[in-house]
Image (cartoon, rainbow, N blue to C red):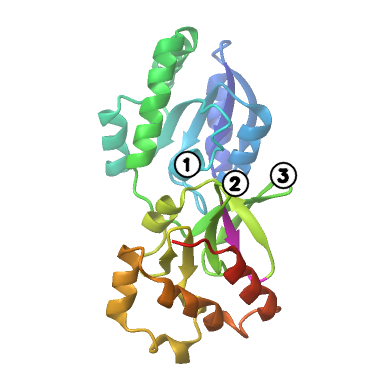
Amino acid sequence: MRSLVIDDEADARARLIRLLGAHPEVTVIGEAQDGLEAIEKIEELRPDLLFLDIEMPGLKGFEVLRSIPSAIEIPLVIFTTGYDQHALAAFEANALAYLLKPIEPERLSVAIERSSKLCSLSAEKEKERESILRATGEAPKTLRKIVCRKNGRALLVPSEPILWFQVQDGIVHATTAKDSFWVNYQLAELEAALPPGEFFRARREVLVNMSHWPPERIDEVDDTERKDNARTKNHENFAAKIPSLFYGRIADPFQLRTDFSRNMPNC
Protein backbone atom coordinates (compact mmCIF):
# COMPACT_ATOMS: atom_id res chain seq x y z
CA MET A 1 0.00 0.00 0.00
CA ARG A 2 1.46 3.33 -1.08
CA SER A 3 1.16 5.44 2.04
CA LEU A 4 1.49 9.07 3.12
CA VAL A 5 2.34 10.06 6.70
CA ILE A 6 0.79 13.37 7.79
CA ASP A 7 1.69 14.93 11.15
CA ASP A 8 2.89 18.38 12.21
CA GLU A 9 5.39 16.85 14.67
CA ALA A 10 8.62 15.73 13.03
CA ASP A 11 9.39 13.27 15.84
CA ALA A 12 5.95 11.66 15.51
CA ARG A 13 6.40 11.27 11.74
CA ALA A 14 9.86 9.80 12.16
CA ARG A 15 8.69 7.30 14.80
CA LEU A 16 5.70 6.17 12.74
CA ILE A 17 7.82 5.75 9.61
CA ARG A 18 10.29 3.71 11.64
CA LEU A 19 7.47 1.46 12.92
CA LEU A 20 6.13 1.07 9.39
CA GLY A 21 9.50 -0.30 8.35
CA ALA A 22 8.44 -3.61 9.96
CA HIS A 23 5.51 -3.88 7.53
CA PRO A 24 6.64 -4.75 3.98
CA GLU A 25 3.07 -4.36 2.70
CA VAL A 26 3.35 -0.61 3.41
CA THR A 27 5.50 1.67 1.26
CA VAL A 28 5.88 5.21 2.56
CA ILE A 29 5.91 7.40 -0.55
CA GLY A 30 5.95 10.73 1.27
CA GLU A 31 5.25 12.74 4.37
CA ALA A 32 3.62 16.09 5.11
CA GLN A 33 4.07 18.44 8.04
CA ASP A 34 0.82 20.39 7.69
CA GLY A 35 -2.60 20.23 6.09
CA LEU A 36 -1.78 22.26 3.02
CA GLU A 37 1.28 20.17 2.18
CA ALA A 38 -0.85 17.08 2.77
CA ILE A 39 -3.40 18.17 0.17
CA GLU A 40 -0.66 18.88 -2.36
CA LYS A 41 0.98 15.49 -1.74
CA ILE A 42 -2.36 13.66 -1.98
CA GLU A 43 -3.07 15.31 -5.33
CA GLU A 44 0.45 14.67 -6.62
CA LEU A 45 1.10 11.14 -5.32
CA ARG A 46 -2.44 9.63 -5.12
CA PRO A 47 -1.64 7.35 -2.15
CA ASP A 48 -3.66 4.25 -1.24
CA LEU A 49 -3.48 4.97 2.49
CA LEU A 50 -3.12 8.01 4.74
CA PHE A 51 -1.80 8.06 8.28
CA LEU A 52 -3.53 11.30 9.18
CA ASP A 53 -3.07 13.35 12.36
CA ILE A 54 -6.37 14.93 13.40
CA GLU A 55 -5.02 17.93 15.35
CA MET A 56 -2.70 20.09 13.26
CA PRO A 57 -2.27 23.86 13.25
CA GLY A 58 -3.79 25.73 10.34
CA LEU A 59 -5.73 22.92 8.71
CA LYS A 60 -6.94 20.01 10.80
CA GLY A 61 -7.18 16.41 9.62
CA PHE A 62 -10.88 16.42 8.77
CA GLU A 63 -10.45 19.73 6.94
CA VAL A 64 -7.74 18.11 4.82
CA LEU A 65 -10.21 15.43 3.77
CA ARG A 66 -12.90 18.04 3.03
CA SER A 67 -10.45 19.90 0.81
CA ILE A 68 -9.53 17.01 -1.48
CA PRO A 69 -11.02 17.72 -4.93
CA SER A 70 -13.97 15.54 -5.81
CA ALA A 71 -12.15 14.29 -8.93
CA ILE A 72 -9.62 12.54 -6.68
CA GLU A 73 -10.56 9.29 -4.99
CA ILE A 74 -10.36 9.56 -1.19
CA PRO A 75 -7.61 7.21 0.08
CA LEU A 76 -8.14 4.85 2.96
CA VAL A 77 -7.30 6.55 6.24
CA ILE A 78 -5.82 5.47 9.54
CA PHE A 79 -6.35 8.41 11.85
CA THR A 80 -3.79 9.26 14.52
CA THR A 81 -4.70 11.40 17.50
CA GLY A 82 -4.11 12.26 21.10
CA TYR A 83 -7.16 11.95 23.30
CA ASP A 84 -9.97 13.82 21.53
CA GLN A 85 -13.38 12.76 22.80
CA HIS A 86 -15.35 13.98 19.78
CA ALA A 87 -12.91 12.48 17.27
CA LEU A 88 -12.88 9.14 19.09
CA ALA A 89 -16.68 9.08 19.16
CA ALA A 90 -16.76 9.77 15.40
CA PHE A 91 -14.27 6.98 14.74
CA GLU A 92 -16.21 4.51 16.87
CA ALA A 93 -19.59 5.49 15.41
CA ASN A 94 -18.32 5.00 11.86
CA ALA A 95 -16.12 1.98 12.63
CA LEU A 96 -13.00 3.75 11.38
CA ALA A 97 -9.39 2.83 12.08
CA TYR A 98 -7.56 5.10 14.51
CA LEU A 99 -4.41 5.02 16.59
CA LEU A 100 -3.89 6.84 19.87
CA LYS A 101 -0.54 8.54 20.38
CA PRO A 102 1.98 7.34 21.31
CA ILE A 103 1.30 4.67 18.73
CA GLU A 104 1.67 1.10 19.95
CA PRO A 105 3.24 -1.36 17.46
CA GLU A 106 0.54 -3.99 18.15
CA ARG A 107 -2.35 -1.63 17.38
CA LEU A 108 -0.51 -0.39 14.30
CA SER A 109 -0.24 -3.98 13.04
CA VAL A 110 -3.99 -4.52 13.49
CA ALA A 111 -4.84 -1.28 11.66
CA ILE A 112 -2.50 -2.11 8.76
CA GLU A 113 -3.90 -5.63 8.43
CA ARG A 114 -7.42 -4.17 8.29
CA SER A 115 -6.45 -1.65 5.60
CA SER A 116 -4.65 -4.33 3.59
CA LYS A 117 -7.81 -6.48 3.53
CA LEU A 118 -9.93 -3.48 2.51
CA CYS A 119 -7.59 -2.75 -0.39
CA SER A 120 -8.23 -6.21 -1.80
CA LEU A 121 -12.03 -6.01 -1.49
CA SER A 122 -13.44 -3.27 -3.70
CA ALA A 123 -16.95 -3.31 -2.21
CA GLU A 124 -15.66 -3.11 1.37
CA LYS A 125 -13.16 -0.46 0.35
CA GLU A 126 -15.98 1.69 -1.04
CA LYS A 127 -17.99 1.27 2.17
CA GLU A 128 -14.95 2.40 4.14
CA ARG A 129 -14.65 5.53 1.99
CA GLU A 130 -18.31 6.29 2.59
CA SER A 131 -17.73 5.97 6.33
CA ILE A 132 -14.73 8.31 6.11
CA LEU A 133 -16.80 10.89 4.25
CA ARG A 134 -19.64 10.53 6.74
CA ALA A 135 -17.31 11.07 9.70
CA THR A 136 -15.77 14.04 7.91
CA GLY A 137 -19.19 15.57 7.41
CA GLU A 138 -20.09 15.04 11.07
CA ALA A 139 -16.87 16.56 12.43
CA PRO A 140 -17.03 20.07 13.96
CA LYS A 141 -16.65 22.77 11.32
CA THR A 142 -15.14 26.16 12.10
CA LEU A 143 -13.17 27.51 9.16
CA ARG A 144 -10.68 30.26 9.95
CA LYS A 145 -8.55 29.51 6.90
CA ILE A 146 -9.75 28.26 3.53
CA VAL A 147 -7.88 26.14 1.01
CA CYS A 148 -7.93 28.26 -2.15
CA ARG A 149 -6.59 27.27 -5.55
CA LYS A 150 -5.13 29.15 -8.48
CA ASN A 151 -2.84 28.16 -11.36
CA GLY A 152 -2.44 24.63 -10.04
CA ARG A 153 -1.37 25.78 -6.57
CA ALA A 154 -3.11 25.38 -3.23
CA LEU A 155 -3.01 28.30 -0.80
CA LEU A 156 -4.27 28.64 2.75
CA VAL A 157 -6.11 31.97 2.93
CA PRO A 158 -7.56 33.42 6.17
CA SER A 159 -11.25 34.25 5.95
CA GLU A 160 -10.76 37.90 6.97
CA PRO A 161 -9.41 39.31 3.66
CA ILE A 162 -11.98 37.48 1.53
CA LEU A 163 -14.57 40.00 0.32
CA TRP A 164 -17.06 37.41 -0.87
CA PHE A 165 -17.63 33.91 -2.17
CA GLN A 166 -19.66 33.51 -5.35
CA VAL A 167 -20.82 30.56 -7.44
CA GLN A 168 -19.90 30.94 -11.10
CA ASP A 169 -20.47 28.13 -13.61
CA GLY A 170 -20.96 25.67 -10.77
CA ILE A 171 -17.64 26.55 -9.08
CA VAL A 172 -17.30 28.57 -5.87
CA HIS A 173 -14.85 31.45 -6.18
CA ALA A 174 -13.29 33.48 -3.37
CA THR A 175 -12.55 37.12 -4.13
CA THR A 176 -10.11 39.32 -2.22
CA ALA A 177 -9.19 42.94 -2.92
CA LYS A 178 -6.33 41.83 -5.18
CA ASP A 179 -7.09 38.33 -6.42
CA SER A 180 -9.63 35.58 -7.07
CA PHE A 181 -9.42 31.85 -6.35
CA TRP A 182 -11.61 28.78 -6.61
CA VAL A 183 -12.39 26.67 -3.58
CA ASN A 184 -13.46 23.06 -3.10
CA TYR A 185 -16.48 23.88 -0.95
CA GLN A 186 -20.17 24.33 -1.55
CA LEU A 187 -21.56 27.72 -0.54
CA ALA A 188 -23.80 26.11 2.09
CA GLU A 189 -20.76 24.37 3.62
CA LEU A 190 -18.91 27.69 3.87
CA GLU A 191 -21.92 29.42 5.37
CA ALA A 192 -22.19 26.72 8.05
CA ALA A 193 -18.48 26.47 8.82
CA LEU A 194 -17.27 30.09 8.78
CA PRO A 195 -17.31 31.98 12.10
CA PRO A 196 -20.89 33.01 13.02
CA GLY A 197 -21.79 36.52 11.96
CA GLU A 198 -18.72 36.99 9.77
CA PHE A 199 -20.39 36.27 6.41
CA PHE A 200 -23.88 37.09 5.14
CA ARG A 201 -25.84 35.22 2.44
CA ALA A 202 -26.60 38.23 0.25
CA ARG A 203 -27.99 36.11 -2.56
CA ARG A 204 -28.38 32.44 -3.26
CA GLU A 205 -25.02 32.42 -5.06
CA VAL A 206 -23.16 34.99 -2.94
CA LEU A 207 -21.68 35.07 0.59
CA VAL A 208 -20.43 38.52 1.61
CA ASN A 209 -17.86 39.28 4.33
CA MET A 210 -19.56 41.65 6.77
CA SER A 211 -16.26 42.90 8.19
CA HIS A 212 -15.50 44.77 4.95
CA TRP A 213 -18.49 47.04 5.30
CA PRO A 214 -17.50 50.61 6.15
CA PRO A 215 -18.49 51.04 9.82
CA GLU A 216 -20.36 54.29 9.15
CA ARG A 217 -22.70 52.50 6.72
CA ILE A 218 -23.63 49.43 8.77
CA ASP A 219 -26.45 51.22 10.61
CA GLU A 220 -28.14 52.01 7.31
CA VAL A 221 -29.47 48.47 7.05
CA ASP A 222 -31.94 47.37 9.69
CA ASP A 223 -30.92 44.17 11.47
CA THR A 224 -34.35 42.64 10.98
CA GLU A 225 -34.19 43.24 7.26
CA ARG A 226 -30.75 41.68 7.13
CA LYS A 227 -31.98 38.49 8.84
CA ASP A 228 -35.14 38.28 6.76
CA ASN A 229 -33.27 38.78 3.51
CA ALA A 230 -30.83 36.01 4.41
CA ARG A 231 -33.73 33.55 4.66
CA THR A 232 -35.67 34.47 1.54
CA LYS A 233 -35.13 35.09 -2.15
CA ASN A 234 -36.75 38.51 -1.95
CA HIS A 235 -33.65 40.57 -1.09
CA GLU A 236 -32.73 42.46 -4.25
CA ASN A 237 -33.01 45.85 -2.54
CA PHE A 238 -30.62 44.89 0.22
CA ALA A 239 -28.17 43.09 -2.06
CA ALA A 240 -28.09 46.13 -4.35
CA LYS A 241 -26.58 48.18 -1.51
CA ILE A 242 -23.61 45.87 -1.06
CA PRO A 243 -21.36 47.08 -3.92
CA SER A 244 -21.45 50.70 -2.73
CA LEU A 245 -20.55 49.56 0.78
CA PHE A 246 -17.28 48.21 -0.58
CA TYR A 247 -16.51 51.44 -2.45
CA GLY A 248 -13.17 52.92 -1.47
CA ARG A 249 -12.07 49.84 0.44
CA ILE A 250 -10.01 48.23 -2.32
CA ALA A 251 -7.35 49.24 -4.82
CA ASP A 252 -9.76 49.37 -7.77
CA PRO A 253 -13.28 50.08 -6.44
CA PHE A 254 -14.79 50.78 -9.86
CA GLN A 255 -13.80 47.33 -11.10
CA LEU A 256 -15.21 45.73 -7.97
CA ARG A 257 -18.52 47.61 -8.32
CA THR A 258 -18.76 46.67 -11.99
CA ASP A 259 -17.88 43.00 -11.52
CA PHE A 260 -20.17 42.58 -8.53
CA SER A 261 -23.25 43.99 -10.25
CA ARG A 262 -22.48 42.28 -13.55
CA ASN A 263 -21.84 38.81 -12.13
CA MET A 264 -24.54 38.59 -9.48
CA PRO A 265 -27.37 36.43 -10.90
CA ASN A 266 -31.02 37.29 -10.59
CA CYS A 267 -32.92 35.50 -7.84
Task: Note whether residue 118 is visible.
Answer: yes
Q: Between residues 256 and 33, which one lies in front from this camera angle?
A: 256
Q: Is residue 15 above or below residue 213?
A: above
Q: Amino acid at mark 1?
A: Arg
Q: Is residue 46 above or below residue 266?
A: above
- Quadrant containing the N terminus is top right
Q: Is 174 in the magenta?
A: yes
| Circle 3 or circle 2, nearest the eye | 3
Q: Which residue is mark 1?
A: 66
Q: Amino acid at mark 2?
A: Leu
> Going from the N terminus, do you reach mark 2 or mark 1 first?
2
Q: Is 203 in the magenta?
A: no
Q: Between residues 22 and 172, which one lies in front from this camera angle?
A: 172
Q: Which residues are magenta?
A: 172-177
Q: Residues within 10 Å of mark 1 (few under 14, many from 20)?
A: some
Q: Which residue is mark 3?
A: 152
Q: Which residue is mark 2?
A: 36
Q: Amino acid at mark 3?
A: Gly
Q: Residues under labels 2 and 1: Cα distance?
A: 12 Å
Q: Position of residue 67 (x, y in %)?
A: 52, 43
At 58% from the left edge and 30% from the top edge, which residue is drawn?
72
Task: Note whether residue 113 is visible.
Answer: no
> Going from the N terminus, do you reach mark 3 or mark 2 first?
2
